[in-house]
Image: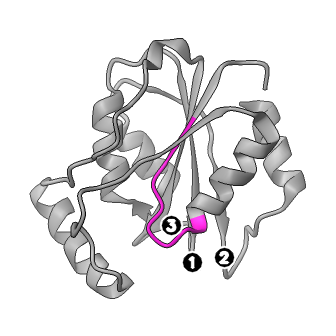
Amino acid sequence: MAQRALILYYSQFDNTARLASQIHKLTGADILRIKVAPGTFPDDMRATDDVYQKQRQTNRLPTLTTKLPQLSYYDVILVGGPVWDGQISSPIMALLNQLQGYQGKVAPFSSGWSDTGNYQRDFVAHAGKLTVLPGYHVLTHGKPAFSLASLMSWLRQV
């Protein structure tokens, strides 16, 4: 990856954070964790899912508290998030709204518990006019599982 890259990621339970950290170590890209306002989501995933479903149904996305850097500096933005109900999380939906107008490429990566679902398709559907590259999607309890070789292969394509 010879491009100027930025890693933006949201992680509620640190699975995506570990993946983002691994990508950062391999690429040396700038990295920034996306945060939501305190109290947005409960600590329990089932309760979080209830909040998430309401957010998707009403399109009332969470407020992001992270200030983004000057995006035009970067050739590619790697956007990481958890798989929620086989789709992108609402913080990633909110982030994609903020990225509108970015002229570079965007490549998603995700971590899920047991199913990647339609993450890539949902990401593209919410990306608007962003140029989206194929993503890297792994599971903590299933396949595709994380492997350094598969991550390196993806990064070479980005």
Which residue is found at the position 71% from the left and 30% from the top? 158
Disc 2 + disc 3, Cβ < 8 Å: no
Disc 2 to disc 3, C-alpha distance: 14 Å
Q: Viewer-nearest of labels 3 and 1?
A: 1
Q: Amino acid at mark 1?
A: Trp
Image: 45 above or below 92? below
Query: Residue at the location (73% across, 67% down)?
Result: 144
- Residue pointed to by mark 1: 113
Q: Residues within 10 Å of mark 2 (few under 14, many from 20)?
A: some
Q: Which mark is residue 140?
A: 2
Q: Is residue 53 left or right of residue 21?
A: left
In the rendered image, which quarter is residue 69 located in?
top left
The magenta stretch is 7-15
| Mark 3, residue position | 117
Q: Secondary structure at mark 3?
A: loop
Q: Is residue 28 left or right of residue 40?
A: right
The reply to whether the C-beta atoms of the residues labelled 1 and 2 are less than 8 Å apart is yes
Disc 1/disc 2 C-alpha distance (Å):
5 Å
Which residue is located at x 59 percent, y 68 percent? 15
